[in-house]
Image: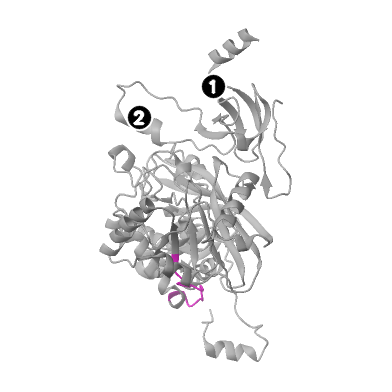
Amino acid sequence: MNGVLVPIQNCTVDMIRIKCPYCGERDHSEFTYGGDASIKYPALDAPESEWTKAIFFRENIRGMQKETWHHTNGCRLWLEVERSTITHEIKSVKACHPQIEKITKNKS
Amino acid sequence: MTRFNAWNVFKNGFTGQKNWDRQWRDPEPKKEYDIIIIGGGLHGLATAYYLAKNHNKKNIAVLEKGWIGGGNAGRNTTIVRSNYMLPGNHEFYEHSLKLWENLSHDLNYNVMFSQRAHVSLYHSPGAKDGAARRYNIMRLHGTDAELWDLDTLKKNIPHLNYNDARFPIMGAAVQRRAGNARHDSAVWGYARAADSLGVDILQNCEVTGVKRSQNNIESLETSRGTLKAKKVGFAVAGHTSVLWQMAGLGNLPIESHKLQAFVTEAVKPLLDHVVVYGVGGAHFYISQSDKGSMVFGGDLDWYKSYAQRGNLPMVQDTAEAAMAIMPCLGRIRLLRHWAGVMDMSMDGSFFICKTPLSNLYLNAGWNYGGFKASPASGWYFADLIANEQPHKHVQNHNLERFEKGINIDERGAGPDPKLHG
């Protein structure tokens, strides 16, 4: 598993550890939480009801969900994280914008 | 049920106070009810109580997956206030505060409501103007509100950091009728009062499935068997989305986030008010319980979660905020802390409304404000279920308000649930 976090069992507090593809494994306090990564925005001329759904309505998954995190105090890139909203276990982390990954790979 | 009064306390004194009745029954579920409320928290129990009391409804059940007082009713900082500004909200919360004022008598249960004043500090002339605007609007609507200058504040609350705070304290916006109440007493009081009016409180009764036709809920699968109901109310804030999807209704304008609260060891009387500190995005509120513990809370944990467990950075943030305004707390020891899961809605306001199903009613989206709202929440939700029509104070607290563009966004933070703390 790519996962990083092992929740502290029988404890009332925890710190999520996110494996940033550029910076390595860091505390979640370095990151800013974005939100649901599964939202697809409709076409600009789509009916209002579709825009209402995209902007205001959420699946609010209880379980594994895709979400965005911004590595604010690191590389400042947006990441797409698969994380459980029950245990906080992380299944995968990848860059939101793969074209950036291509650029960084070419450089190295 | 034996009433609580001086005579009964005296009489039971002869037998060591051991012969009191159960506070509420533990009935076996019936096959069918007229009204089932899912969620045995403050909101669900208050709804059942007012359905029976105000609307003379019989044959009501409240389903609770755990035990009474085990969810968010036992996970809050017990603050009661009505300093709201927007139409709909201020009437609603003022009604709630009025119900709190008489709640102990109404329920025949001491909810220990203490109107010790809610003191919201401001730290800049701009913040003072903002507070003056909000509190003037409250006064125009008949709610009590006042501004304290620095001298008044120092006289009333001497222990704040008036010397070298990073954000100097300049005064406070105050609601004197606000304060706090005992959370356990409130939920036990509602349970006992509802039960005495014939409401069946079914604990350890988790809803595991919702059977429905096109337009109706037909029955509920629960851990204590299949239950039928003519009308069903959801009052499970924190887990509303889960139940909503169980009923096949899709998405809601809600995200579940968690909020932590903290209790310290008991100390001698130190703070006689509820003090709120909010500057630069920080958010901190503190009061002292009757036992002497300092009870306080801070911001959300910032990411979506259903875990009833908080994170460490927020513990640190909250401790920093505490030190910023009350440095005298520096060596106090934390006794317990916990996190509650909350419905954070897309505009920071709640839902008491009808749903796409004809016999289902929704009570959800309480954000930070569920505890103080519970009496009015039960009051108006019962009204909606009984009369099939929302009261005018909650007529815009529905799921359609986003599409209509009439969001009730007290903070003006926009459609991001975590910003509505």
Our reading of the magenta stretch's main secondary structure is: loop
Subunit ID for the residue under disc 1: A
Subunit ID for the residue under disc 2: A
- Say left or right for B112 vs B91: right
**Corner quadrant of residue A20:** top right
The residue that appears at 73% across and 43% down in the rendered structure is A8
| Numbered range of the magenta stretch | B106-118
The residue that appears at 64% across and 83% down in the rendered structure is B19
Please tell me whether mark 2 sits on a helix, a strand or a loop: helix
Q: Nearer the viewer, residue A66 or B272?
A: B272
For the residues labelled 2 and 1, the Cα–Cα distance comes to 22 Å
In this view, B101 is above or below A37:
below
Viewer-nearest of discs 2 and 1? 1
Q: Circle 2 sits on which residue?
A: A51
Q: Which color scheme did the rendering employ for the protein?
A: one colour
In this view, B201 is above or below A107:
below
